[in-house]
Image (cartoon, coloured by chain):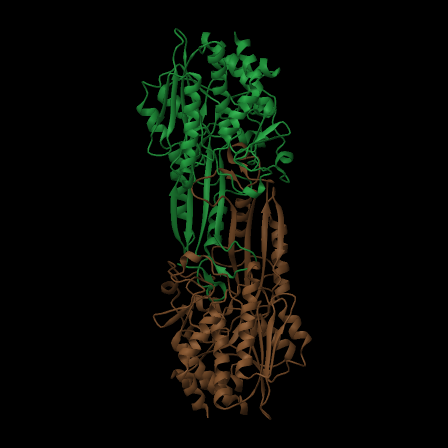
Chain colours: A brown, B green
Amino acid sequence: MTQEVIDYLKENEEQLLQKLHTFLEIESVSTDASKKQEMEKAVDFLTGYLRDIGFTTVERKDTGGHPLVYAEWTGAEDAPTALFYGHYDVQPADPYDLWDSAPFKPTIRDGKIFARGASDDKGQVFMHLAVFEAYLKTQGSLPINVKLVIEGEEEIGSGNLYPFLENNQELLKADFSLISDSGMVDKGIPTILYGLKGFTGLEVTLTGPNRDLHSGLYGGAVKNPAMALAQLLAGMKNEDEEITVPGFHDGIEELSVGERKLMNAAPGENFVSTTGVPEEAPEKGFTAKEHTMARPTFEVNGIFGGYQGEGTKTIIPSKATAKITCRLVPGQDPTHVQDALVAYIEEHAPKGVHVDIKREALSAKAYKVDPNHPLLEKAAESYSAAFGRETVFVRLGGSIPVVETIDSLFGIPVVLLGFGTPEDNLHSPNESFPLEHFSKGMEVLATYYHDVKNV
Amino acid sequence: MTQEVIDYLKENEEQLLQKLHTFLEIESVSTDASKKQEMEKAVDFLTGYLRDIGFTTVERKDTGGHPLVYAEWTGAEDAPTALFYGHYDVQPADPYDLWDSAPFKPTIRDGKIFARGASDDKGQVFMHLAVFEAYLKTQGSLPINVKLVIEGEEEIGSGNLYPFLENNQELLKADFSLISDSGMVDKGIPTILYGLKGFTGLEVTLTGPNRDLHSGLYGGAVKNPAMALAQLLAGMKNEDEEITVPGFHDGIEELSVGERKLMNAAPGENFVSTTGVPEEAPEKGFTAKEHTMARPTFEVNGIFGGYQGEGTKTIIPSKATAKITCRLVPGQDPTHVQDALVAYIEEHAPKGVHVDIKREALSAKAYKVDPNHPLLEKAAESYSAAFGRETVFVRLGGSIPVVETIDSLFGIPVVLLGFGTPEDNLHSPNESFPLEHFSKGMEVLATYYHDVKNV
């Protein structure tokens, strides 16, 4: 029976890819207020597709922000119910000039689909829809019951998803949750994530003079906000990459020798060769693998102030801004960490500037699940069968805040079936997804949806 | 005789202002490659005007960059020759949205002309031309001989002016030099500048990964270039505003108690109220007046890297850049200072990033002239007569590199007849120039051109 499904997916791969291209062409950048129409297009695509293949309930849900799509197919008696989560919104595509092909014109080359969202997360959401199509067309039914929540605000903090989940607990009742919004440790290596990082952040703007000033006439009279910002930031992390903000590390468990060994043994990318940096830069006392998987981070995502054009402009900038986000590990409370950052900035902001802090609305605790849970073991079997390799279990540095929310709201295990690769350029120019993972991944899902019904 | 000239200027003020507006409407932004046509327009305006009023030689000189205007009127036998210098190029006008009226649509309100270049330097160049017009129309001659050099590259380093001056020393021979590209310590207070700062600078870019990276997947593996830049900059100036780059201060003479007293006694603006900063931020051990007039500065003119748009983008930026310029005081050698900055950056650049340094081509030594020179005393008399107040002698923090060049090439005194005010918003949005300074300033010039012939 699963074979028919897999055959359908193979025979119709061209058509499915065409449909995926249509989805990827939609510029559903959630952070860009001018793309509201595109967000609606993405919703129409999803609801249209789900209705076409026979989902019984398909709804566009207004949220106050970008709408989300809810759908269900619940015709499998005596079978468990999976709550599938995904997102149809994508990161901004700039800087456009670094893309080899246009971000919203999906292009296939070197065995990959290049497009914004190819991996994160449209491509992976689409694989589930295609598997549902294959089941419904060939079997007339799905092996288990499925409830889908596909939101449009993942890249801007899922602010409206959480109330939706909280207010619809009866509707969304399920036995476990399924998410494909992550990747494998390397191309072709089946990977189960059993831990994710949490998240918090803020934006700080230092304002000195009420306008840009002539550096000759005012240099020496007023504090330079760009220099003030540099001094402030430099106090928050030292050259050993240790975050020096008091309270930041509160609650973190020490990494055990055993888990460190596991992390360092896991296959992974060579960061120097994949990113072009002259050398790795993990926190002192930890390897890059340990830091990315299991130590918190503090990153300046953007810094700006003053003149950025060609040539020289001899000014003292009026203001300077840093956008900061942190990835958190189990034990850290996001609000406590954000408070600690705010307290540090307020206490240490250089004299001579006004301080303005915008707290990032999104926050999430880190998440960790028992890697021996039967749902994960079954997933590992499906992966290993399709990819012909043993599945590895890892923690990763990315954040999927919804995982922690589903865990705490519904008390159900969350299975993270990721198919991306480290070469996908998530959030970067030239985002891509390997065609091989598209076909093998659908095979994994076809098998897993079938096998999981008896867990 | 001078009275006829002054009367002419008063009677024709409306027409002269109209002509000035035409000059200010030209978008002669020298740093902007797309404005080449506008630069030519400015040259045409100047050469046309000078020919109309009767200058005997009026030439557009190709320079390899933006052209400069050379003109002379040398019909005054047995009278000294002045070498006048000015510039027709202006700073970029961005950010445009902070202007109350369009930067290139001169607008009069509150007794001021608002336009980019109103004060720096088109407005002040124009005053000399108007005085020449008044002399030639009413007297048929100028009281002294005049050679004019008006360049189009002052705001981008005067790279082609210096070879021109060097290669035309016979042509430009003069007894003294006259420049109006500066201001008074306050509105209505006649001011003679007897010292200016020098200048050097550079741009530093730190590159980490070869693309923006997902902060979750790579945070902890690679150095964040924006944080690296913050750490680098923070090491170059401490929180006491002391520049901490070894070698930076080499050669600086200590400020005498007497000169410090003079500086602090000079009238000047209240930096807190004119700029809106919460407090002044001079170097420890110096007042804001002392620092702006006579201590070197290190300013970050611009800083940028990573995401600057709305909302959050959870990336590690590929690179981060700081544009830096320094104002220098007598005793400092610009090349030595630039070398010291480069050496510091190369030695202290954080690990894990590539360093790229672009040296600023412009550099200039600081300049100081004897405030008791008869040429300056005569200027002070003209000022005091027109403005009805005693003239003050000050050093200012701005740089006019050409002053140092003229001094060293021609060995002649440079008289700085500035008419701007601290409220002019030089290099900032809403640049302006007071109408009162326009009329009284022309009176000063009419008198000075006459009286200076017997010095």
Q: Nearer the viewer, residue B368 or B111?
A: B111
For the C terminus of chain A, the image quarter is: bottom right
The x and y percentages for residue A139 are 50, 91
Does residue B289 appear to the left or right of A447 in the view shown?
right
Asked whether the viewer can see residue B365, the reply is no
Tell me which residue sits at (61%, 24%) in the image. B187
**Vertical position of residue A160 compared to residue A205: above or below:** below
**Vertical position of residue A368 compared to residue A308: above or below:** below
Q: Nearer the viewer, residue B352 or B218?
A: B218
Tell me which residue sits at (47%, 11%) in the image. B452
Asked whether the viewer can see residue B338, the reply is yes
Does residue B447 appear to the left or right of A352 in the view shown?
left
The x and y percentages for residue B33 are 40, 41
The x and y percentages for residue A126 are 49, 76
Question: To which quarter of the image does residue A203 belong?
Answer: bottom right
Tell me how many marks there are. Answer: 0
Does residue A202 appear to the left or right of A378 in the view shown?
right
